[in-house]
Image (spheres, rainbow, N blue to C red):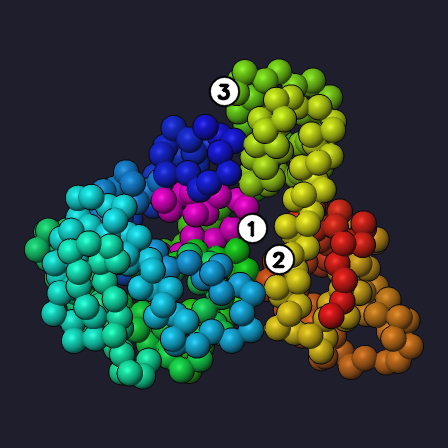
Amino acid sequence: MYFDLQPKNRRADLYDFENQLGQLLELLRGPRARVPLITVIGSRRTGKTSLVKTALTESGLPHLTLNGMAFAEVPVIKKRSLLLSLERELNETIEREKGWGKKLLGVLDGIRWLKVNSKPPFVHFEWKRPKDVDLIDLAYSFNRLARESRTKFILVLDEAQEFRRLVGYSLQKLMAHIYDNVEGIQMIVTGSQVGFLHDFLGVDDSESPLYGRGTADIQVPRITRDLAADFLEKGFKQTKIEPDADVINHAIEKLDGIIGWLTFFGAKSVERGSATEEELDEAIKRGSELAIKELKNFLMIRRQASGRYVQILRSARSRHAASWTNLKEDLELQEKKHIANNVFSDLVENLVKSNFLQRNENSTYSIADPLLAHGLRRGYVKLF
Protein backbone atom coordinates (compact mmCIF):
# COMPACT_ATOMS: atom_id res chain seq x y z
CA MET A 1 0.00 0.00 0.00
CA TYR A 2 1.35 3.41 -0.99
CA PHE A 3 -0.15 5.08 2.09
CA ASP A 4 1.49 2.80 4.66
CA LEU A 5 3.58 5.04 6.95
CA GLN A 6 6.16 2.31 7.62
CA PRO A 7 9.21 2.21 5.30
CA LYS A 8 8.45 0.01 2.31
CA ASN A 9 10.30 -3.22 1.62
CA ARG A 10 8.46 -4.51 -1.48
CA ARG A 11 8.71 -3.21 -5.03
CA ALA A 12 4.90 -3.22 -5.33
CA ASP A 13 4.65 -0.65 -2.52
CA LEU A 14 7.50 1.53 -3.78
CA TYR A 15 6.41 4.37 -6.07
CA ASP A 16 8.52 5.77 -8.92
CA PHE A 17 11.92 4.52 -7.83
CA GLU A 18 12.59 2.22 -10.77
CA ASN A 19 15.73 4.10 -11.81
CA GLN A 20 17.22 4.37 -8.31
CA LEU A 21 16.18 0.83 -7.39
CA GLY A 22 17.80 -0.49 -10.56
CA GLN A 23 21.03 1.39 -9.77
CA LEU A 24 21.15 0.10 -6.21
CA LEU A 25 20.35 -3.51 -7.15
CA GLU A 26 23.06 -3.43 -9.81
CA LEU A 27 25.59 -2.32 -7.20
CA LEU A 28 24.41 -4.92 -4.68
CA ARG A 29 24.48 -7.73 -7.23
CA GLY A 30 27.79 -6.69 -8.69
CA PRO A 31 31.30 -7.35 -7.34
CA ARG A 32 31.90 -5.85 -3.90
CA ALA A 33 35.39 -4.73 -4.92
CA ARG A 34 33.87 -2.46 -7.54
CA VAL A 35 32.03 -0.34 -4.95
CA PRO A 36 32.72 -1.01 -1.25
CA LEU A 37 30.77 2.11 -0.17
CA ILE A 38 27.40 3.32 -1.51
CA THR A 39 25.70 6.57 -0.48
CA VAL A 40 21.96 7.16 -0.84
CA ILE A 41 21.26 10.87 -0.51
CA GLY A 42 18.09 12.96 -0.54
CA SER A 43 15.99 15.38 1.50
CA ARG A 44 13.91 14.22 4.43
CA ARG A 45 10.95 12.01 3.52
CA THR A 46 11.93 11.42 -0.08
CA GLY A 47 11.97 7.65 0.43
CA LYS A 48 15.64 6.75 0.99
CA THR A 49 15.00 4.16 3.68
CA SER A 50 12.21 2.51 1.65
CA LEU A 51 14.50 2.37 -1.36
CA VAL A 52 17.29 0.66 0.60
CA LYS A 53 14.94 -1.78 2.37
CA THR A 54 13.31 -2.80 -0.91
CA ALA A 55 16.68 -3.32 -2.60
CA LEU A 56 17.88 -5.46 0.31
CA THR A 57 14.68 -7.54 0.22
CA GLU A 58 15.00 -8.14 -3.52
CA SER A 59 18.71 -8.91 -3.34
CA GLY A 60 18.23 -11.44 -0.55
CA LEU A 61 21.62 -10.46 0.87
CA PRO A 62 22.27 -10.74 4.63
CA HIS A 63 22.40 -7.29 6.19
CA LEU A 64 22.33 -5.24 9.35
CA THR A 65 21.06 -1.67 9.73
CA LEU A 66 22.17 0.79 12.39
CA ASN A 67 19.79 3.77 12.44
CA GLY A 68 21.32 7.13 13.32
CA MET A 69 17.86 8.62 13.97
CA ALA A 70 17.84 6.71 17.25
CA PHE A 71 20.32 9.37 18.43
CA ALA A 72 18.69 12.44 16.84
CA GLU A 73 17.83 14.00 20.19
CA VAL A 74 21.15 13.19 21.87
CA PRO A 75 23.77 15.98 21.98
CA VAL A 76 26.62 13.49 22.44
CA ILE A 77 26.60 9.79 21.53
CA LYS A 78 28.72 7.66 23.83
CA LYS A 79 30.19 4.34 22.78
CA ARG A 80 28.05 2.57 25.38
CA SER A 81 24.87 3.91 23.76
CA LEU A 82 26.11 2.84 20.34
CA LEU A 83 26.81 -0.69 21.62
CA LEU A 84 23.38 -1.01 23.25
CA SER A 85 21.71 0.11 20.00
CA LEU A 86 23.83 -2.34 18.00
CA GLU A 87 22.97 -5.18 20.38
CA ARG A 88 19.25 -4.41 19.96
CA GLU A 89 19.53 -4.29 16.17
CA LEU A 90 21.37 -7.62 16.08
CA ASN A 91 18.71 -9.33 18.16
CA GLU A 92 15.86 -7.92 16.07
CA THR A 93 17.63 -8.92 12.86
CA ILE A 94 18.28 -12.50 13.99
CA GLU A 95 14.65 -12.89 15.09
CA ARG A 96 13.24 -11.33 11.90
CA GLU A 97 15.42 -13.06 9.32
CA LYS A 98 14.47 -16.73 9.62
CA GLY A 99 16.88 -17.85 6.89
CA TRP A 100 20.31 -16.36 7.34
CA GLY A 101 19.53 -15.02 10.84
CA LYS A 102 20.44 -18.32 12.48
CA LYS A 103 23.61 -18.51 10.37
CA LEU A 104 24.51 -15.05 11.66
CA LEU A 105 24.02 -16.28 15.20
CA GLY A 106 26.40 -19.15 14.48
CA VAL A 107 29.26 -16.96 13.27
CA LEU A 108 28.86 -14.60 16.24
CA ASP A 109 29.51 -17.44 18.65
CA GLY A 110 33.06 -17.20 19.87
CA ILE A 111 33.45 -13.41 20.09
CA ARG A 112 35.02 -12.96 23.51
CA TRP A 113 32.78 -10.08 24.61
CA LEU A 114 29.52 -11.48 23.19
CA LYS A 115 27.27 -14.15 24.73
CA VAL A 116 25.13 -16.21 22.35
CA ASN A 117 21.79 -17.78 23.40
CA SER A 118 19.47 -20.13 21.54
CA LYS A 119 16.39 -18.07 22.53
CA PRO A 120 15.73 -14.28 22.54
CA PRO A 121 17.64 -12.24 23.37
CA PHE A 122 19.96 -14.14 21.09
CA VAL A 123 23.05 -12.06 21.75
CA HIS A 124 24.21 -10.05 24.72
CA PHE A 125 27.26 -7.82 24.79
CA GLU A 126 29.35 -8.37 27.90
CA TRP A 127 31.97 -5.86 28.90
CA LYS A 128 33.39 -4.21 31.98
CA ARG A 129 34.28 -1.10 30.04
CA PRO A 130 32.92 -0.13 26.57
CA LYS A 131 36.48 0.35 25.30
CA ASP A 132 37.01 -3.40 25.77
CA VAL A 133 34.64 -4.00 22.85
CA ASP A 134 36.25 -3.93 19.41
CA LEU A 135 33.62 -3.80 16.68
CA ILE A 136 36.09 -5.11 14.13
CA ASP A 137 35.34 -8.52 15.70
CA LEU A 138 31.75 -8.15 14.49
CA ALA A 139 32.92 -7.10 11.04
CA TYR A 140 34.99 -10.25 10.64
CA SER A 141 32.06 -12.37 11.84
CA PHE A 142 29.87 -10.77 9.15
CA ASN A 143 32.66 -11.46 6.68
CA ARG A 144 32.73 -15.10 7.75
CA LEU A 145 28.98 -15.38 7.17
CA ALA A 146 29.42 -13.92 3.69
CA ARG A 147 32.26 -16.31 2.89
CA GLU A 148 30.44 -19.40 4.15
CA SER A 149 27.28 -18.39 2.24
CA ARG A 150 29.28 -17.47 -0.87
CA THR A 151 27.76 -14.02 -0.93
CA LYS A 152 28.43 -10.66 0.71
CA PHE A 153 27.13 -8.95 3.83
CA ILE A 154 25.59 -5.45 3.69
CA LEU A 155 26.17 -3.03 6.55
CA VAL A 156 23.76 -0.08 6.46
CA LEU A 157 24.17 3.18 8.39
CA ASP A 158 20.82 4.93 8.00
CA GLU A 159 20.91 8.73 8.52
CA ALA A 160 24.61 8.32 9.16
CA GLN A 161 25.29 12.03 9.71
CA GLU A 162 23.90 11.62 13.25
CA PHE A 163 26.98 9.55 14.15
CA ARG A 164 29.24 12.58 13.77
CA ARG A 165 28.45 13.27 17.46
CA LEU A 166 29.88 9.91 18.52
CA VAL A 167 32.68 10.28 21.09
CA GLY A 168 35.16 7.68 22.25
CA TYR A 169 34.99 5.64 19.07
CA SER A 170 35.56 6.31 15.36
CA LEU A 171 33.05 4.69 13.03
CA GLN A 172 35.03 6.22 10.17
CA LYS A 173 38.12 4.21 11.15
CA LEU A 174 36.02 1.05 11.30
CA MET A 175 34.52 1.85 7.89
CA ALA A 176 37.96 2.55 6.40
CA HIS A 177 39.24 -0.80 7.71
CA ILE A 178 36.23 -2.60 6.22
CA TYR A 179 36.67 -0.70 2.96
CA ASP A 180 40.32 -1.70 2.63
CA ASN A 181 40.48 -5.15 4.24
CA VAL A 182 37.12 -6.87 4.71
CA GLU A 183 36.23 -8.09 1.25
CA GLY A 184 32.89 -9.67 2.15
CA ILE A 185 31.21 -6.49 3.47
CA GLN A 186 29.65 -3.78 1.34
CA MET A 187 28.49 -0.61 3.10
CA ILE A 188 25.49 1.64 2.43
CA VAL A 189 25.11 5.01 4.13
CA THR A 190 22.04 7.20 3.80
CA GLY A 191 21.63 10.82 4.79
CA SER A 192 19.07 13.61 4.63
CA GLN A 193 21.39 16.25 6.07
CA VAL A 194 23.59 16.04 3.02
CA GLY A 195 26.24 18.53 4.09
CA PHE A 196 26.70 16.94 7.50
CA LEU A 197 26.79 13.47 5.92
CA HIS A 198 29.62 14.67 3.69
CA ASP A 199 31.42 16.00 6.77
CA PHE A 200 30.89 12.71 8.61
CA LEU A 201 32.36 10.62 5.80
CA GLY A 202 35.19 13.06 5.12
CA VAL A 203 36.19 11.46 1.81
CA ASP A 204 37.57 14.86 0.74
CA ASP A 205 39.14 15.66 4.12
CA SER A 206 42.81 14.70 4.31
CA GLU A 207 42.50 14.20 8.08
CA SER A 208 39.58 11.75 7.80
CA PRO A 209 40.15 7.96 7.94
CA LEU A 210 37.96 7.67 4.82
CA TYR A 211 39.91 10.26 2.85
CA GLY A 212 40.29 9.35 -0.82
CA ARG A 213 37.89 6.41 -0.75
CA GLY A 214 35.54 6.34 -3.69
CA THR A 215 31.77 6.08 -3.32
CA ALA A 216 28.85 5.31 -5.61
CA ASP A 217 26.22 7.99 -5.07
CA ILE A 218 22.49 7.53 -5.62
CA GLN A 219 20.32 10.66 -5.47
CA VAL A 220 16.70 10.43 -4.34
CA PRO A 221 14.87 13.59 -5.51
CA ARG A 222 11.42 14.96 -4.84
CA ILE A 223 8.82 13.84 -7.33
CA THR A 224 7.30 16.16 -9.93
CA ARG A 225 3.79 17.61 -9.69
CA ASP A 226 2.54 15.16 -12.33
CA LEU A 227 4.00 12.22 -10.45
CA ALA A 228 2.59 13.54 -7.16
CA ALA A 229 -0.88 13.63 -8.74
CA ASP A 230 -0.41 10.10 -10.09
CA PHE A 231 0.83 8.86 -6.70
CA LEU A 232 -2.21 10.25 -4.88
CA GLU A 233 -4.62 8.98 -7.52
CA LYS A 234 -3.22 5.44 -7.38
CA GLY A 235 -2.89 5.50 -3.61
CA PHE A 236 -6.50 6.53 -3.08
CA LYS A 237 -7.64 3.92 -5.60
CA GLN A 238 -5.98 1.28 -3.40
CA THR A 239 -8.01 2.53 -0.42
CA LYS A 240 -11.34 2.89 -2.27
CA ILE A 241 -11.48 6.57 -1.23
CA GLU A 242 -12.51 9.08 -3.89
CA PRO A 243 -11.10 12.54 -3.08
CA ASP A 244 -12.28 15.74 -4.71
CA ALA A 245 -10.00 16.96 -7.52
CA ASP A 246 -9.51 20.31 -5.76
CA VAL A 247 -8.22 18.52 -2.64
CA ILE A 248 -5.65 16.65 -4.73
CA ASN A 249 -4.48 19.89 -6.35
CA HIS A 250 -4.20 21.63 -2.99
CA ALA A 251 -2.23 18.70 -1.55
CA ILE A 252 0.22 18.80 -4.45
CA GLU A 253 0.63 22.55 -4.07
CA LYS A 254 1.12 22.50 -0.31
CA LEU A 255 3.22 19.32 0.05
CA ASP A 256 5.60 20.11 -2.82
CA GLY A 257 6.54 16.70 -4.19
CA ILE A 258 7.74 15.27 -0.87
CA ILE A 259 6.46 11.72 -1.06
CA GLY A 260 6.61 11.26 2.71
CA TRP A 261 4.19 14.14 3.26
CA LEU A 262 1.93 12.95 0.42
CA THR A 263 1.88 9.53 2.11
CA PHE A 264 1.14 11.19 5.46
CA PHE A 265 -1.88 12.95 3.95
CA GLY A 266 -3.06 9.68 2.40
CA ALA A 267 -2.66 7.83 5.71
CA LYS A 268 -4.63 10.50 7.60
CA SER A 269 -7.39 10.21 5.00
CA VAL A 270 -7.49 6.43 5.38
CA GLU A 271 -7.65 6.84 9.14
CA ARG A 272 -10.71 9.08 8.83
CA GLY A 273 -12.29 7.35 5.85
CA SER A 274 -12.38 10.43 3.62
CA ALA A 275 -10.08 12.84 1.80
CA THR A 276 -11.38 16.38 2.19
CA GLU A 277 -9.82 19.75 2.96
CA GLU A 278 -10.28 18.88 6.62
CA GLU A 279 -8.02 15.82 6.34
CA LEU A 280 -5.47 17.81 4.35
CA ASP A 281 -5.42 20.57 6.98
CA GLU A 282 -5.01 18.00 9.73
CA ALA A 283 -2.12 16.32 7.89
CA ILE A 284 -0.43 19.69 7.37
CA LYS A 285 -0.83 20.59 11.06
CA ARG A 286 0.50 17.25 12.34
CA GLY A 287 3.24 17.14 9.72
CA SER A 288 4.34 20.66 10.65
CA GLU A 289 4.66 19.58 14.27
CA LEU A 290 6.93 16.71 13.20
CA ALA A 291 9.05 19.04 11.06
CA ILE A 292 9.39 21.49 13.95
CA LYS A 293 10.39 18.64 16.26
CA GLU A 294 13.25 17.80 13.89
CA LEU A 295 14.31 21.45 13.94
CA LYS A 296 14.21 21.41 17.74
CA ASN A 297 16.54 18.39 17.75
CA PHE A 298 18.95 20.41 15.63
CA LEU A 299 18.66 23.43 17.95
CA MET A 300 19.01 21.35 21.12
CA ILE A 301 22.71 20.78 20.48
CA ARG A 302 23.17 24.41 19.38
CA ARG A 303 21.36 26.15 22.20
CA GLN A 304 23.62 29.19 22.30
CA ALA A 305 22.81 30.13 18.70
CA SER A 306 19.27 28.70 18.57
CA GLY A 307 17.63 32.14 18.46
CA ARG A 308 19.79 33.14 15.51
CA TYR A 309 18.98 29.98 13.58
CA VAL A 310 15.25 30.47 14.10
CA GLN A 311 15.42 34.14 13.07
CA ILE A 312 17.26 33.23 9.85
CA LEU A 313 14.63 30.62 9.02
CA ARG A 314 11.79 33.00 9.79
CA SER A 315 13.34 35.62 7.53
CA ALA A 316 13.77 33.09 4.72
CA ARG A 317 10.14 32.04 5.12
CA SER A 318 8.71 35.55 5.14
CA ARG A 319 10.78 36.65 2.15
CA HIS A 320 10.23 33.34 0.27
CA ALA A 321 13.53 33.72 -1.59
CA ALA A 322 15.99 35.82 0.41
CA SER A 323 19.55 36.81 -0.42
CA TRP A 324 22.40 36.23 2.02
CA THR A 325 22.48 40.00 2.60
CA ASN A 326 18.72 40.13 3.29
CA LEU A 327 19.01 37.41 5.90
CA LYS A 328 21.99 39.04 7.57
CA GLU A 329 20.32 42.46 7.67
CA ASP A 330 17.19 40.96 9.24
CA LEU A 331 19.21 39.23 11.97
CA GLU A 332 21.25 42.37 12.71
CA LEU A 333 18.05 44.41 12.86
CA GLN A 334 16.56 41.99 15.35
CA GLU A 335 19.69 41.89 17.53
CA LYS A 336 20.46 45.59 17.04
CA LYS A 337 24.14 44.92 16.47
CA HIS A 338 26.64 44.07 13.75
CA ILE A 339 27.41 40.38 13.09
CA ALA A 340 30.70 39.37 11.50
CA ASN A 341 30.36 37.94 8.01
CA ASN A 342 32.18 34.72 8.83
CA VAL A 343 29.98 34.10 11.89
CA PHE A 344 26.82 34.62 9.87
CA SER A 345 28.10 32.47 7.00
CA ASP A 346 28.66 29.58 9.43
CA LEU A 347 25.08 29.89 10.69
CA VAL A 348 23.64 29.81 7.19
CA GLU A 349 25.92 26.97 6.11
CA ASN A 350 24.84 24.83 9.07
CA LEU A 351 21.19 25.32 8.13
CA VAL A 352 21.96 24.37 4.52
CA LYS A 353 24.01 21.32 5.54
CA SER A 354 21.15 20.15 7.75
CA ASN A 355 18.70 20.67 4.86
CA PHE A 356 16.43 23.07 6.74
CA LEU A 357 17.47 25.88 4.40
CA GLN A 358 18.09 25.41 0.69
CA ARG A 359 20.37 27.43 -1.54
CA ASN A 360 18.62 28.17 -4.84
CA GLU A 361 20.18 28.48 -8.28
CA ASN A 362 19.97 32.28 -8.18
CA SER A 363 21.95 32.33 -4.88
CA THR A 364 18.87 33.05 -2.78
CA TYR A 365 17.75 30.97 0.19
CA SER A 366 14.38 29.45 1.04
CA ILE A 367 12.90 26.93 3.47
CA ALA A 368 13.53 23.40 2.19
CA ASP A 369 10.37 21.80 3.63
CA PRO A 370 6.92 23.37 3.08
CA LEU A 371 5.62 21.98 6.36
CA LEU A 372 8.57 23.40 8.26
CA ALA A 373 7.67 26.77 6.71
CA HIS A 374 4.08 26.25 7.83
CA GLY A 375 5.19 25.44 11.37
CA LEU A 376 7.38 28.55 11.50
CA ARG A 377 4.51 30.68 10.25
CA ARG A 378 2.20 29.27 12.93
CA GLY A 379 4.80 29.85 15.64
CA TYR A 380 5.14 26.17 16.61
CA VAL A 381 8.83 26.55 17.46
CA LYS A 382 9.70 27.84 20.94
CA LEU A 383 13.21 28.77 21.99
CA PHE A 384 14.97 27.07 24.88
Question: In the visual, does 281 lie left or right of 193?
Answer: right
First along the sequence among labels 1 and 3: 1
Q: Position of residue 247 (x, y in %)?
A: 71, 24
Q: Nearer the viewer, mark 1 or mark 3?
A: 3
Q: Is residue 356 above or below residue 182?
A: above
The numbered dot on residue 44 is: 1
Q: Position of residue 182 (x, y in %)?
A: 19, 67
Q: Position of residue 140 (x, y in %)?
A: 17, 68
Q: Is residue 230 above or below residue 138?
A: above
Question: In the visual, does 118 lie left or right of 345?
Answer: left
* Any part of residue 166 in sight: yes
The numbered dot on residue 312 is: none
* Label 1 – label 3 distance at C-alpha: 25 Å
User: Which residue range is magenta in the image?
Assistant: 37-53
Q: Residues within 10 Å of mark 1 (few under 14, many from 20)?
A: many
Mark 3 vs 2: CB contact within 8 A = no
First along the sequence among labels 3 and 2: 3
Please give the name of the residue rendered at 53% of the width and 44% of the height, measured from the top-left corner: 46
